C-alpha cells in the first residue's frame, strides 16, 4: 500500500476528529449509541474513506451499530464535507475494528506458551539427575 502524502494524513485525522464529535451529537438513530472512531483511511483518489469503529461498552450489538452507521453514512458524508471544506466528500465505509480482539487473542496465546515453557523448565529442573539439581554445572 503506497504511503499517503501529508494532505491525505491531515484529512484522515480531521475526518476522525469530526466523526468522533458528530456521531454522538448528530446521529439520531438509536441503534448507533456510543462508539469510538478508532481510525480513518482514505483511498488514494479520495473517493472513499474506511472508518473503523469500536462499540463503547459491553451492552452494544456491533452489527446493529454498523447498520445504523451505514444508514447515516450519507448524512455524515455531507456534514464531514461541510465541516472540512471539501468540494468532493469521500464515500464513508464503516467497519468494525477487530484489532483489539486480535491483540487480546495473541496475548492469550503468548501467555499460554510462556506458562507451558515454564512448566517444562520446572519439570526438567526437579527431575533426578538433571544438571539443575546436581549444581556442578557439568
Image (cartoon, rainbow, N blue to C red):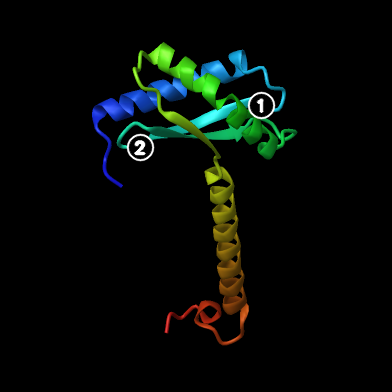
User: Which residue is farthest right?
Assistant: 59
Query: How many residues crowd around disc 2 within 10 Å: few (fewer than 14), some, or many (20 or more)?
Result: few
Q: What percent of the width, then of the height, locates residue 73?
A: 54, 26
Q: Which of 40 and 111 is in front in this view?
A: 40
Q: Is mark 2 on a helix, strand or loop?
A: loop
Query: How many residues crowd around disc 1 within 10 Å: few (fewer than 14), some, or many (20 or more)?
Result: many
At a point 54% along the width and 55% down the height, the residue shown is: 106
Which image quarter holds the C terminus? bottom left
Q: What element carries label 1?
A: loop
- Residue at the spot of label 1: 32
- Residue at the spot of label 2: 43
Asked if disc 1 and disc 2 are in contact, CB closer than 8 Å, the reply is no
Q: Is residue 30 above or below residue 46?
A: above
Q: Earlier in the sequence, mark 1 or mark 2?
A: 1
Q: What percent of the width, then of the height, locates residue 46?
A: 34, 31
At a point 45% along the width and 25% down the height, the residue shown is: 16
Q: Of the numbered discs in the image, which one, if any, rests on residue 42?
A: none
The answer to which quarter of the image holds residue 34 is top right
Q: Nearer the viewer, residue 63 or 135?
A: 63
Amino acid at each position: 500500500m503506497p504511503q499517503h502524502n501529508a494532505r491525505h494524513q491531515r484529512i484522515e485525522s480531521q475526518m476522525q476528529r469530526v466523526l468522533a464529535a458528530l456521531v454522538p451529537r448528530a446521529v439520531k438513530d438509536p441503534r448507533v449509541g456510543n462508539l469510538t472512531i478508532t481510525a480513518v483511511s482514505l483511498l488514494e483518489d479520495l473517493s472513499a474513506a474506511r472508518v473503523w469503529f469500536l462499540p463503547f461498552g459491553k451492552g452494544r450489538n456491533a452489527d446493529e451499530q454498523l447498520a445504523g452507521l451505514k444508514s447515516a453514512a450519507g448524512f455524515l458524508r455531507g456534514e464531514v464535507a461541510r465541516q472540512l471544506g471539501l468540494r468532493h466528500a469521500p464515500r464513508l465505509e464503516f467497519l468494525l475494528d477487530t484489532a483489539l480482539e486480535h491483540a487480546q487473542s495473541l496475548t492469550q496465546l503468548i501467555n499460554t506458551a510462556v506458562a507451558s515453557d515454564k512448566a517444562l523448565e520446572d519439570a526438567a529442573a526437579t527431575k533426578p539427575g538433571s544438571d539443575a539439581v546436581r549444581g556442578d554445572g557439568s
